[in-house]
Amino acid sequence: MQTITNQSLIARDLDVIWHPCTQMKDHETLPLIPIQSAKGVYLHDFEGNSYIDAISSWWVNILGHSHPRINQRIKDQIDKLDHVLLAGFSHESAIELAEKLVEISPEGLEKVFFADNGSSGIEVALKMSFHYHKNRGKNKPLFVSLTNSYHGETMGALAVGDVELYKETYNEILIQSIQTSVPKDQSEAAALEAIVEAEKLFAEQHEHISAIIIEPLVQCAGLMHMYHPIFVTKLRELCDRYDIHLIADEVATGFGRTGTLFAIEQSGVSPDFMVLSKGLTGGYMALSTVLTTNEVYQAFYCDYLELKAFLHSHSYTGNPIACSAANATIDILRDEHIIEKNQEKIAYIKKQTERFKSLEKVKSVRQTGMICAIELSGYTFEDRVGIRVYQYALKHGVLLRPLGHVIYFMPPYTITLEEIDMMIEVAYLGIVSLE
Ligand SMILES: *Cc1c(COP(=O)(O)O)cnc(C)c1O
C-alpha cells in the first residue's frame, strides 16, 4: 500500500476541488494543508506536523475536536435514526434541542425553526420578518443592517451585509438594504452616537422597514470590530417604538464566544429573532436554528386557506445527527461549567496580549470574551500581511487565519493556558518578523 503524503493529496485535491473564499492561483505558492486527524485543539497533517487550531476551524469548533461526549452522542444517534423529513414528522433529538434552546435563550424566544447553515438561517429570519408584517397587512420591503456587517453569502444574507470585498461584485443583483453606522469603537459614547443616527433613520423610514439585523457586540468577519452593549439595549427601545424587528445574528457570537452564553445577554434585552449556527453543533455538523417569539408565530397561525403559512424548507432541516451533536454540545457547556471556567482564560488572554500594544505596528488590541484581535497599521491591501503572518504561524505550529491586517485569536474553549501562551507567542513573533 502506498503511504499517503501531504504532497500526493494536494495534487489530487487541486485537480478536482474549488476551495471556498480562495483565489485558487494562490495555491501555486501557498501550500494546501491536508489534515488527517484532529483531537482537542490540535490538527494533525499526514507528515507528523500539528497545528493549534487558534480560530476554531472558522469559529465553529468551540469544545475541541473529536470530543468524546459529542462523538458518543452522534454514534448513538446514527444507530437509531439517520434522517427523517421534519414536515409532518418529528424526532426526539430535534424536540430535545428545541426545548433546550428555548430554555437557555433570552426571555420571550419560544419557537424554534430549523435550517441547515448560518446563511440559510439568516434568510429564514429575513423572510419571516417581512412575512410577519405582510400577514398583518403591512408591506415593509426594507431591511436595515450595520455598516461593516457580515451575515453570510447567500443572496439575501449578502444583501444585508456590508463587507465590500464579498459584496461589491454582486451589488446589481441584490435586494435592497440600508446601513446605519456601527458604533466606531467600544466606548459608550460611540454607542450613543450611533443610536442617534439609527433613530433618525427609523423616524424617517420606519413604515418601510421590516427589521434591523445586527451581530451583537462583535462583527467577526468585519475585522473583529467590537462595540458597547448599550447600543443593543437602546436599539431594542427604538425597534419597539417603530414596530421594527430586531434580528440578532448570533451565528458567530453564540454559545459563549463573547463571555456570556449569548452576546445579547450583555445588553439585557431579547431580540425578536435569534439566528444560531457555527458553535451550535460544537463544530461537527451544519445546522442552524432561528428562534422567535410567540407573537411572530401567531401571525402565521390560521386556517391553511388563508395562505399565511411560512412555506420555507431545506432538505436537511433538523437533521437528527446534527441535532444530537448540538444536544451534546449544550449539555457539555452546562455540565462542565465551560462559560464560568472561560473567565479565567479570558483574563489570561487579556494579560498576555498586553505586550502587543507596545509594538509599533500594532494599532489596537481589543477583546470581547474569547475573541481577541490585534489590528496592525501601516500596511496596504497589496502587502497581504495577513497571509504572511498565516504562513509564519503555520511553520511554527499554529493555525491563525488573519482577516486582512487583523490577527485574531478565537480558540476552542478547551485550550489550556500553556497552549494560549504558545498561540500568542507565535502571533507575536509573526508580527515582529514582518517588515
Ligand atoms: C459565518 C456567519 C454567517 C454565515 O454562516 P454560514 O454557515 O457560513 O453560512 C452569518 N452570520 C455571521 C455573523 C457569521 O459569522
Image (tube, rainbow, N blue to C red):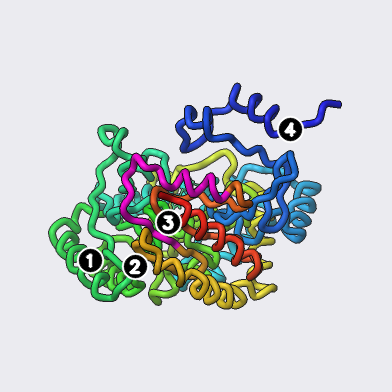
Q: Mark 2 points at which residue?
A: 227
Q: Is mark 1 on a helix, strand or loop?
A: helix
| Numbered label attached to residue 220 | 3
How far apart in space, not on screen, are marks 1 and 3 (Cα)? 19 Å
- Nearer the N terminus, badge 2 or badge 3? 3
Measured as percent of width and height from the top left, residue 6 is found at 69, 34
Membership of 315 in magenta stretch: no
How far apart in space, not on screen, are marks 4 and 2 (Cα)? 45 Å
How far apart in space, not on screen, are marks 1 and 4 (Cα)? 53 Å
Q: What element carries label 2?
A: loop
Task: Answer left or right for 149 relative to 319.
Answer: left
- Nearer the N terminus, badge 2 or badge 1? 1
Give the residue type at disc 3.
Answer: Cys
| Numbered label attached to residue 5 | 4
- Nearer the N terminus, badge 3 or badge 4? 4
Measured as percent of width and height from the top left, residue 152 is found at 42, 46
Q: Can residue 22 be seen in this view?
A: yes
Q: Which of marks 2 and 1 is in front?
A: 2
- Nearer the N terminus, badge 1 or badge 3? 1
Q: Is mark 4 on a helix, strand or loop?
A: loop
